[in-house]
Structure formats: C-alpha cells, structure tokens
C-alpha cells in the first residue's frame, strides 16, 4: 500500500529594509508565529537596527542585505546581493515588506517564486512630482511580479486599486501581540515627584516626515496656552531629530529609541500619531491594546483602526497644526472621556487586531500560493 507523506511546511524568506519601527515589529511577530507553526524562516535585512538581534533571539536565521531606503543606483548592488540570498535559501515563498524590499525582490525574482508584497503604505505617498509619478508607474508594472499583494487596511487596498494597480489583493490587518501589549506592566517613569502633574501626551514613531512629529511640535504651543501643565514625549529617533529638538518648547521630552514602547503607552493619558500617510499605523493599535486612548490623523487605515463611534473625537486632518491642537485640547480637557475611550479601544483591539489572527491569515495566503489547503497555526511561545 503506497504511503503519501504530508507536505512539508514552507520555507519562507522575508525581505525588509526597515529594521526599526512598525515594519520591523510586524516582521518579528510573523517570524515568531511562523516558526511556532513549524515553518522554516529566514530574514534578509540590513545588519543595523534592532530587528536582527530580536530575530536571532527567536532562533531565526538572519542574512545581511544592506539596502538604502530610497531607490537609485544602489538597486543594482542590492539586487545582486538579494539574488545570492535567494539562491542560498531556495525559498518556497518570498515575502517582501515595504517599498524598497518590494522593488528589489520583485525585480530579482520576477515571479519565478511565489512572491507576497506587503507595502506597509504606498511608496508614491512619500514623494511628490516626478518621483511620485515614477513610483506609481512602477507599482502598476511591478504588480505582475507579485503573486499576492497584501494590504493592511481596506483604505490602502482601495488607494492601490484607484491608481490602476491590478493585483491579486488580500486584506490582512495589522495585529498586536496581546501578551506583550496590555494595561498590566511597568509604566515609563516620566512624572517626577517635583514635576507638575499635567496630562501626558506620548508620540511613538520614527522621527521623520511621514510620522508628522513636526506638525505636532508646531501645534504644541497652542495646547500649552490652554493646558500649561501638559507634557509631550516623543519616543523614537530618525533623520528629523535635530530639527525637531530645535523647534520644540521646553515641555517636550525626547526619549530616543526604545526596545519596548509599552511602558510609554501605559504612562500616557493620550497617545497621538500625526502621520502624513500610513497603511495602518501599528503604534496606535499597540497603545489601544495597553488601554490608552489615541488621536490619529485621517490617513489610510486610521478609521479602520478605531473603535466604532470614536472617529468624531479621535481623528484629525493630516498636516494641520491648528486642527491637531484643537483635538488635543478637547481630549485632554476630558479626563473621564479619555478613560472611556481607552476602555473601548482595548476591547476593539482584542476583537479585531490580535496578531494571532494576522499570522493565521498570512499563513492562509501562503497556503493558496503553494496549493496547501491549510497551514497549521499554533500560538507562539512567550519569549
């Protein structure tokens, strides 16, 4: 009697240029879940940043793939190196994260291996003029080399479709590790005994134009006029650090990059994310999982990330310091309202943004590509 062996779990190659921030946390969470499901997982990424160390702690093989954030002549060198990585790993699936990895991976693989491209916000939203037109043209043409184009919000998907990108779309919202992000645990020690106990606003993210901290710093003096004891903490670093420091009033604290943002979410009376563009921002989801209310700008994914009925209070227009200040003042002046928003936010994330659901949905996409009905998903072991 012939014996038919079960198909082996897939060998997955994740490719990412960001090694800090939300994209890096998404990659690490996927790796953790996929290894728990028995998949062979390798990650190609730059050697700097927090991601390689975090992956190594999970027992994941990490291969150095040095890449700049922007396209340019370096793409040729980056492509050669990624070709070497692909030849060595021999993956069943290539999963490329964010614009640069999506560009290079699709040019290298060209559909010869099942390829998942996950933009984590569209490249053309980060630039203007000719650069934006070129980016839109590339995304329309490059979509033919993505077996699946995985979007983290309905708004991100609709933006792509509206610009004529034709793809096999899949919607998989970002998820949060609910064992790591919750109201129980240490809070950042930001309120010294001799300091005024005013409301605390926290913004977590790379200090760069996308995340809009410059808009927040511009809005902050107006907040202080109404709430002079309010305090603002910017958690993260990036290319705009020095410019923001020069523009910020004394009540703004720069905490720098941190390995674990959860204590900052727990300490905050309000977490704000003033982004100019997103797919669906991870930091507000993490904050809500910790029971903290959030204020976000009305960019792709923002409305989908909020509890039902919260948009009127928790959304503000992007790139509008005056509107941002009004929203901050209104929320910070209502302590009981903030507590209610925080409770609603935590329930919403538990219901709709559990990272285990995200990992299972991604595994289903891999199964489609490889002709497998299901790929078993098991809850990762806590680390």
Image (cartoon, rainbow, N blue to C red):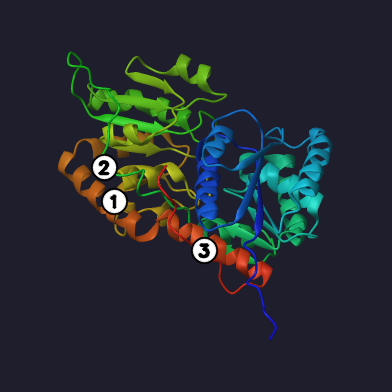
User: Which residue position holds label 1?
Assistant: 346
For label 3, the SS is helix
Residue 345 lies, with reference to residue 364, above or below; the image says above
Q: Which residue is mark 3?
A: 361
Query: Quick check: marks 3 and 2 in contact, CB under 8 Å?
Result: no
**Residue 264: where, in percent of width, then height?**
33, 32
Q: Position of residue 339 (x, y in %)?
A: 20, 44
Q: Give the mark nearest the N terminus, 1 or 2.
A: 2
- Look at the numbered discs 1 and 2 and tell me whether their residues touch, using CB distance below 8 Å: yes
Measured in 3D between alpha carbons, the distance from the residue under mark 3 to the one under mark 1, in whole angstroms, is: 22 Å
Q: Position of residue 135 (x, y in %)?
A: 72, 46
Seen from the viewer's position, the closer of residues 321 and 151 is: 151
Mark 3 packing: few (<14 Cα in 10 Å), some, or many (20+)? Answer: some
Quadrant occupied by the N terminus: bottom right
Q: Outermost residue, front direction?
A: 1
The local crowd at label 2, few if under 14, some if 14 to 19, many if 20 or more residues have their Cα within 10 Å, is: many
SS for callout 2: loop
Q: Dot 1: what SS?
A: helix
Image depth: mark 3 or mark 1 in front: 3
To which residue does mark 2 refer? 183
């Amino acid at each position: 009697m012939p014996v038919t062996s079960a198909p082996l779990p897939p060998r997955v190659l994740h490719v990412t240029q960001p090694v800090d921030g939300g994209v890096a946390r998404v990659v690490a969470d996927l790796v953790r879940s996929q290894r728990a499901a028995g998949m062979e997982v390798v990650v190609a990424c730059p050697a700097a940043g927090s991601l390689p160390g975090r992956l190594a702690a999970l027992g994941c093989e990490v291969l150095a793939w040095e890449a700049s954030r922007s396209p340019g002549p370096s793409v040729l060198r980056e492509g050669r190196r990624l070709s070497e990585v692909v030849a060595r790993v021999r993956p069943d699936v290539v999963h490329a994260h964010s614009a640069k990895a999506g560009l290079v991976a699709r040019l290298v693989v060209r559909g010869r291996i099942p390829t998942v491209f996950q933009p984590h916000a569209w490249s053309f939203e980060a630039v203007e003029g000719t650069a934006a037109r070129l980016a839109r043209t590339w995304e329309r043409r490059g979509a033919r080399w993505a077996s699946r184009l995985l979007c983290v919000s309905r708004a991100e998907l609709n933006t792509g479709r509206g610009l004529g990108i034709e793809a096999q779309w899949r919607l998989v919202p970002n998820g949060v590790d609910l064992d790591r992000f919750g109201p129980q645990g240490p809070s950042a020690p930001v309120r010294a005994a001799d300091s005024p106990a005013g409301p605390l606003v926290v913004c977590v993210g790379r200090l760069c134009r996308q995340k809009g901290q410059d808009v927040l710093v511009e809005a902050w003096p107006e907040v202080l006029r109404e709430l002079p004891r309010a305090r603002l903490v910017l958690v993260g670093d990036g290319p705009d650090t020095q410019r923001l420091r020069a523009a910020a009033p004394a009540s703004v604290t720069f905490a720098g990059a941190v390995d674990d943002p959860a204590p900052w979410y727990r300490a905050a009376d309000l977490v704000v994310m003033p982004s100019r563009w997103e797919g669906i921002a991870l930091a507000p989801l993490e904050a809500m999982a910790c029971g903290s209310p959030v204020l976000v700008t009305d960019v792709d994914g923002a409305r989908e990330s909020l509890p039902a009925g919260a948009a009127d209070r928790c959304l503000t227009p992007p790139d509008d310091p005056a509107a941002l200040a009004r929203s901050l003042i209104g929320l910070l002046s209502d302590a009981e309202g903030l507590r209610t928003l925080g409770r609603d936010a935590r329930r919403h994330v538990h219901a709709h943004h559990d990272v285990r659901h995200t990992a299972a949905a991604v595994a289903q996409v891999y199964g489609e590509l490889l002709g497998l009905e299901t790929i078993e998903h098991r809850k990762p072991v806590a680390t």
